[in-house]
Structures are given as structure tokens and as C-alpha cells.
Image (cartoon, rainbow, N blue to C red):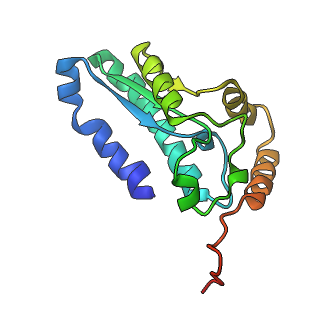
């Protein structure tokens, strides 16, 4: 996960800057609402998505003088096979925060074309990502830990562990 969200993302975000500059292109990185929170129970995932967000923020500013746009998209839950592969049950998909992959792609493209640095699809997700700035960090940590414990990945049926 560190290789994907940090090393590979950094390499790909910077590898083609000269070409993007010549052709007026840009980069859309996929973060997550998780990027705004500590994530006990999924610490590496949350931290990796925070890296995606912070790198994208910095590159948005650094590459703007070159005419290269950088947008970070931070969706909430997206109904895909990710949840099942991660061992998460359907209760992990908070309906008010969930948006389809097609809708996320449309929002990402629209935001990118408008030169937005950050796209957080959905009103509830926008509110959720703003809250940690106004709440004590210890409170946020406890709240996320409690949520994570309720929605912790479960082993497949019949798996008794190591």
C-alpha cells in the first residue's frame, strides 16, 4: 500500500511533467475522505491517502506555473469489489457518503477541467472532511477508532485465523 500510494504515485505524478507541459495536460490523483482522518484499524490506508492529498496539493501549486493542472479527488465509499476484498461488510458503506464510480469520475473530470486543486464529491463528504479541523484531534481519533472497530474487516466464513 505504501508503494502504491507513495512511491508509485510520486513517480507517475512527476515522470511525465515535461510532456504534460508541452501538451497542456495534467494529473488527477485519487485520494479518499480517509485522507482527512487518523485511521486506527486501517492506519496505512488512511496515511497513504493523506500522502496522496498532501502531494497533490503541493504539486498543484508547484506545477501551475508550467501550465500543468493537478487535482486530487477524495471520494467517500464507492461501491466496488474493494470492500469485499478488504473484508469489509456492507455496513461499511455509509449510504449518505456513497457515490457511484461513474459519478465520481464525472465530478473528478469536471473539477479537473475547472482547475480545482481538490474535489470532494457529495455534500456529506464535504462536511465530513471539514470537521476534523474544528474538533480536538483526540476526539476525532476516538470517533474514527470506534467506527473502525464496528466495521473492522471480518475473516471469510469458516476461517478461524492463524
Residue lying at the far top of the rendered structure? 114
Count of marks placed on residues: 0
| 67 relative position to 111: left or right | left
Which residue lies at the image location 39% right of the left edge and 26% below the top edge? 70
State the residue in front, 114 or 159. 159
Q: Is residue 101 above or below residue 23?
A: below
Residue 69, quarter of picture? top left
Q: How far across and how far down the image is residue 102, in percent?
A: 49, 31
State the residue in front, 19 or 109. 109
Q: How far across and how far down the image is residue 108, in percent?
A: 47, 26
Q: Is residue 134 above or below residue 3?
A: above
Which residue lies at the image location 80% right of the left edge and 49% below the top edge? 143
| 70 relative position to 127: left or right | left
Q: How far across and how far down the image is residue 46, in percent?
A: 58, 50
Q: Is residue 3 above or below residue 129?
A: below
Which residue lies at the image location 66% right of the left edge and 84% below the top edge? 160
| 71 relative position to 63: left or right | right
Residue 44, quarter of picture? bottom right
Which residue lies at the image location 56% right of the left edge and 40% below the top edge? 32
- Give the quarter of the figure containing the C terminus: bottom right
Residue lying at the far bottom of the rendered structure? 162
For the question of whether residue 22 can be seen, the reply is yes
Q: How far across and how far down the image is residue 159, in percent?
A: 62, 81
- Give the quarter of the figure containing the N terminus: bottom left
For the question of whether residue 57 can be seen, the reply is no
Amino acid at each position: 500500500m505504501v508503494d502504491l500510494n507513495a512511491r508509485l504515485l510520486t513517480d507517475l505524478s512527476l515522470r511525465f511533467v515535461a510532456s504534460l507541459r508541452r501538451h497542456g495536460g495534467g494529473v488527477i490523483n485519487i485520494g479518499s475522505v480517509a485522507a482527512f482522518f487518523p485511521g486506527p484499524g486501517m492506519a496505512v490506508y488512511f496515511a497513504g491517502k493523506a500522502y496522496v492529498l498532501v502531494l497533490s496539493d503541493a504539486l498543484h501549486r508547484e506545477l501551475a506555473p508550467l501550465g500543468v493542472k493537478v487535482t486530487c479527488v477524495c471520494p467517500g465509499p464507492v461501491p466496488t469489489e474493494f470492500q469485499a476484498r478488504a473484508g469489509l461488510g456492507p455496513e461499511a458503506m455509509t449510504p449518505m457518503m456513497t457515490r457511484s464510480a461513474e459519478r465520481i469520475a464525472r465530478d473528478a473530470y469536471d473539477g479537473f477541467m475547472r482547475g480545482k486543486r481538490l474535489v470532494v464529491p457529495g455534500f456529506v463528504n464535504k462536511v465530513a472532511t471539514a470537521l476534523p479541523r474544528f474538533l480536538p484531534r483526540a476526539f476525532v481519533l476516538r470517533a474514527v477508532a470506534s467506527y473502525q472497530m464496528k466495521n473492522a474487516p471480518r475473516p471469510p466464513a469458516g476461517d478461524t485465523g492463524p
